[in-house]
Image (tube, rainbow, N blue to C red):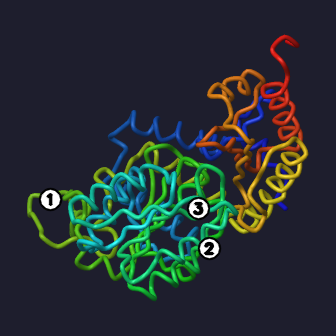
Amino acid sequence: MIPNQRDRFSLPSEVAYLNCAYTAPLMKTAEAAGRRALAQKAAPWELTAAHFFETIRENRRLFARIIASAAEDVALIPSVSYGVALAARNLPVAAGQKIVVLQDQFPSNVYTWRRRALETGAVLSTVDRPGDGDWTTALLDVIDRDCAIAALPHCHWTDGTLIDLAAVGARCREVGAALVVDGTQSLGAMPFAVADIQPDFLITTAHKWLLGPYSFGFCYIAPRWQENGVPLEENWLNREGSEDFARLVDYRDAYQPGALRFDCGEASNFILAPVAAQALRQILDWKVVNIAATLKIRTEAIAVQARDAGFETAPAAFRAPHLIGLRLTTPPPDDLPARLSAAGVYVSVRGSAIRVAPHLYNTQEDIDRLFQALQVSLWTPASAG
């Protein structure tokens, strides 16, 4: 159990921010790193050629430790949609084959596959939400010899219902399908080891559970897709010999080794990279397994209070440790987030679920405030004030 870490964040005492799945607050150390980065950019004569590569190497190395992979298997990307486009460009799919996604999956991991299906004659196969919350069994029933790609999250972004990616990965290998994982709503809050899951592509943005900046992310690419892989961009950084600025006019066909060929343009990102690195260092210091265990205690407490208040939640066996959806028999009102924010409580409504996403900065008092605000917002008659 990690002690409460609220003092590491600039969160006012009157704010109950239970919305890390929306975007995380920056830690004070990350804020400071961003200020230093801005000051450095104000004095560009102090930027050397080495700066362009040190920032990339450091973030690549740190993220690789989060997922227990080799650093050279990680590319730097600006968004999940960029990483999904990389996967779609490099994974084979033929007419009549299936690309498997979940019902209500996050759109950045759907739109590209819709287009790919149209281009190739493949079939976009959407797995319906299971009534009992068991996505894994539903997926194992669908991933067969006709499946080319399974493009999935580790947990559903609307309510935290869980997928056993080790079992799904094993099935994909058994039938010859590729596994593309959007880890945006899990990496940094749920343990993940590449050797256990064996994804073909693993994609994430940094601004949620990795506690980093917006427009900064990572993409693991399995070694089998690297040597002949095609990047989305042809930029100077992803070419061999790019460290020698004086010889950039000597155009080269050879790419940087490993997944480095897939790095986006301007991956050095002098402003965002130091912020991301500071956040990754702290997560590694806490250890993801400890973060997950601590947040599981929070979400279990939320589940108990939710049931007492008349909400439904997924069974504990099918819930991620850090993210939980609360449901009523009818969908929540559209203005519920606004009603709650007026009381200083911040959560999201996604689909039919009130999505509650605590982190190490939250307290039991925050949870109590949430349910008090829900009571007022959902069940107190307007005439009662």
Q: Residue furthest left?
A: 250
* Callout 1 amino acid: Leu
Residue 12: give x, y in percent of width and height: 76, 29
Nearer to us of marks 3 and 2 is 2
* Callout 3 amino acid: Leu
How many other residues sit within 10 Å of disc 3, few (<14), some (14-19) or many (≥20)? many
How many other residues sit within 10 Å of disc 1, few (<14), some (14-19) or many (≥20)? some
Residue 337: give x, y in percent of width and height: 67, 29
Which part of the image, by quadrant, shows the C terminus? top right
Residue that carries the numbered disc 3 in the rendered image? 187
Residue 56: give x, y in percent of width and height: 40, 59
Of the residues under marks 1 and 2, which one precedes in the sequence? 2
Residue that carries the numbered disc 2 in the rendered image? 164
Marking on residue 185: none
Identify the residue at image location x=48%, y=74%. 142
Marks 3 & 2, CB-CB < 8 Å contact: no
- On the picture, is 121 further left or further right than 173? left
Residue that carries the numbered disc 1 in the rendered image? 248
Relative to 169, residue 156 above or below: above
Residue 239: give x, y in percent of width and height: 21, 66
Q: Quadrant of residue 138?
A: bottom right
